[in-house]
Image: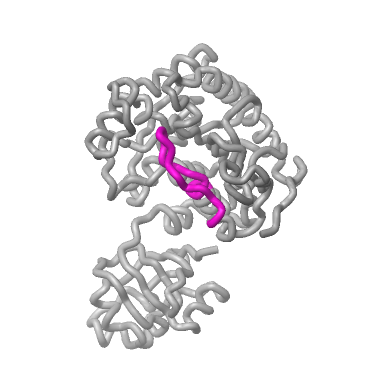
Amino acid sequence: MTIKEGLKVSERFDPATLKRVVIKVGSSSIIQPDGPVRLGFLGKLATTIAELHGRGVQIVLVSSGAIALGRKRLGMEKKPVHIEDKQACAAAGQMELMSLYQNMLSTLSMQTGQVLLTRDDLEDRRRYLNARETLKRLLELGVLPIINENDSVSVDEIQFGDNDELSALVAGLVDADLLVLLTNVDGLFDANPKDNPDAKLIECIDCSADEYFDNADNRETDLGKGGMRSKLAAAQICRGFGIPCVIARSKGSILEKALNGESVGTYVQPLECHVGSRDRWLSKAAAVQGSLSLDPGAVEALTKNGKSLLPKGIVAVDGDFKRGAVLSITDDHGKEIGRGVARYNSRDLQRIMGKYAVEIESILGYTFGDCVVRQDDLALTH
């Protein structure tokens, strides 16, 4: 593995260009393992947010901690395992979590607003746009949106898994210029520093993070469930969106240094691309309801020539889905090359796959056009 040296301030990003930043705070940053709330850290976080707000930088805060605070409030000694206990802790702890933020930020003349989301809220296109407009309006009004997963009603089937993924999707949702993931470690190391005292901090990742996943610890703590691997996955999402990401320890002036582009934590460099809101939704947030496997010619037409998907290039259809469903589009080896919106349902696609576009109407008795997925309804995998 190659260890990347830390980038200079000017090489990370220009702090003057930051207009909107998403900051994610984990449970271990909010509450100590033995129970006390980290009031010093939260006070420093509130001050930094207020200073940024005063400079015209819009901040969105994604905060864990409701279950950990609720568990303490309800007198549960052990981390809850059953879903109903988690939901009860979340309901009790969310009030305390928001109270902490509101009390600290109100003394700094800042308004806060609570936004609770589930995966369903972002998978559905209409609800995704509703969430986007709500957050946009809150920011326009000078309100700090504080986002958490709606754990009091979430079940395993609709959970994000952790707030790292949620924060990356929110960064795409609000067109952020930077995502900062604050955690209880200094960043990503080339080995687990708990087991290897010679482990070195990886200061910059300027390529796909796939090679780093094996070295990333994903063990849950007694307070939270997002390990370093989930943070790398979140950073990968942002990388594909064209949004830079910093993974750093929640202590001292680390956040200010990260926002100034200084070499702290692990910096994940984004791809040099602009990904629109619809493509971000298609590629990472939308619920996938089926898949299409393509021959090499069709793969090349989509990925290199920017073409729409014609039925002739489809070799397999998987799933039972309706017209308008979001599909995973793969090559003939099963590797995903993108996601797109189907113009025909699964039964019709079974009948027209491998056929020429001019044959569609004679086979089905009607047509929605020559293509199965239009180029502007397709988000390619970077």
| Residue 206 placement: quadrant | bottom right
In the rendered view, would you say 162 is above or below 284?
A: above
| Residue 357 placement: quadrant | bottom left
Instruction: Please check the rendered image and state whether residue 217 is part of the magenta-colored stretch, yes or no.
Output: yes
Q: Considering depth in this image, is 62 or 26 the residue closer to the camera?
A: 26
Looking at the picture, how far across and down is residue 173, in whole percent?
Answer: 47, 45
Looking at the picture, how far across and down is residue 141, in whole percent?
Answer: 48, 26
One can see residue 333 in this view: yes
Q: Residue at x 33, y 45 (%)?
A: 159
Query: Which contiguous range is marked in magenta?
Result: 214-231
Instruction: Please check the rendered image and state whether residue 47 is part of the magenta-colored stretch, yes or no.
Output: no
Left or right, 177 with respect to 91, comes to right
Report the residue that reaches farthest toward the top.
107
In the rendered view, would you say 73 is above or below 245?
A: above
Looking at the picture, how far across and down is residue 22, in whole percent?
Answer: 53, 37
Q: Residue at x 75, y 40 (%)?
A: 9
Q: Residue at x 44, y 78 (%)?
A: 333
Q: Considering depth in this image, is 379 or 259 the residue closer to the camera?
A: 259
Q: Considering depth in this image, is 268 or 218 the residue closer to the camera?
A: 218
Looking at the picture, how far across and down is residue 263, in whole percent?
Answer: 71, 39
Tell me which colouring the rendered structure shows: one colour
Q: Main secondary structure of the magenta part?
A: loop
